[in-house]
Amino acid sequence: MNPSRRTFIKNSAIVVAGAALLPETLLAEPKKLTRLGVQLYSVRDAMGKDPMGTLKKLSEGEVKHVEHANYINRKFYGYTAKEFKKILNDLSMQMPSGHTVMTAHDWDTDKKDFTDKWKYTIDDAAEVGQRYVISPWLDESLRTDLDGLKRFMEQFNKCGELCKAHGMSFGYHNHDFEFSTKVEDGNLFEFILKNTDPSLVLQQLDIGNMYGVPGGDALAIINKYPGRFELMHVKDEIKSANQGEMGHGYESTILGQGLLPVKDIVKAARRKGGTSQFIIEQESYQGKDPVDCVKIDLQTMKKWGF
């Protein structure tokens, strides 16, 4: 054997053996930056009355990232994209993601293109600094219309392409009906995952909305569909005195004080779910101040290693 060839093989073997001893984290593909944020729907009443003052309180409570749930007539909580971005910047805050419902009417079938209204939505999301545009609803008329659903999933993929052209990603956020609605041989949630391109349509898994619904086990879903949930709404749930937020007897509460194994779920999401964006959302407060609840939730997550 040629000496130089022998030396090459020997050195290669040493490199391979050395690589086997390296931690998996050094060999794995670079992960996306993990962010911990707050969905502003958690403090919706306060944001409606005094958005700037509420954001200031959240900032003082160490909230650095927020997710909006209010985009109306090209304004975020009454401010243009440019204005709202400045408000956030002045408070050393960012808004990586936001909720805006996309409907079938946002696609112009004659032009075979998105409507100007939806294009403005994407433009404004990019202007305010979003990295993710999340649609958090699916119209009831579509849920059992198989042909309509298939067309809408194509629209989802096309929106993923549109968002990519603006340096962003498109995603869908679940409630509970995705698990209770039967489509073909499974449920609506499975249909959405099977009929969207993972590289174009991300999933924001809301672990509280699904709780109490058959098939709505967050840990089981993460294990069944690894890598599909780049974003997550982190919630805890308790039994409600009435029908609760989703109408099936549960309501959200301070993290770690409810029935969900939240710590185990977020750990699994990090390890197997592909989750990098963790957004706290609490919609019921059991008599406590919503801003105070959010601050406690944030500190709980930090105790869990975030």
Image (cartoon, rainbow, N blue to C red):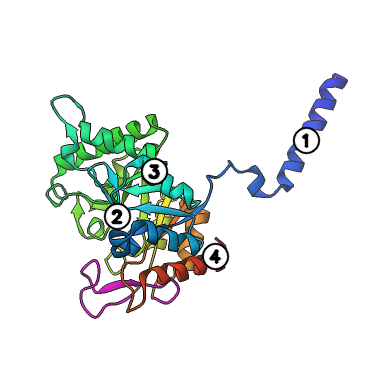
Residue wearing tag 3? 132
**Badge 2 or badge 4: first in the primary sequence:** 2
Residue 258's quadrant in the figure? bottom left
Whether label 2 touches label 3, CB < 8 Å: no
Residue wearing tag 1? 13
Residue type of the residue flagged with mark 4: Lys
Residue type of the residue flagged with mark 2: Asn
Residue under the image location 38 percent in, 56 percent down:
52
Q: Nearer the viewer, residue 229 or 297?
A: 297
Whether label 3 touches label 1, CB < 8 Å: no
Q: Where 292 sits versus 118, above or below?
A: below
Residue wearing tag 4? 302
Q: Nearer the viewer, residue 22 or 61?
A: 61
**Badge 2 or badge 3: first in the primary sequence:** 3
**Badge 4 or badge 1: first in the primary sequence:** 1
Q: Nearer the viewer, residue 22 or 256?
A: 256
Residue 241: say if magenta. yes
Whether label 4 touches label 3, CB < 8 Å: no
Q: Which residues are magenta?
A: 238-258
- Percent across and percent down for residue 225 are 40, 51
Direction from residue 149 to residue 41 in the image, left or right: right
Direction from residue 57 to residue 141 in the image, left or right: left
Residue 87: say if magenta. no
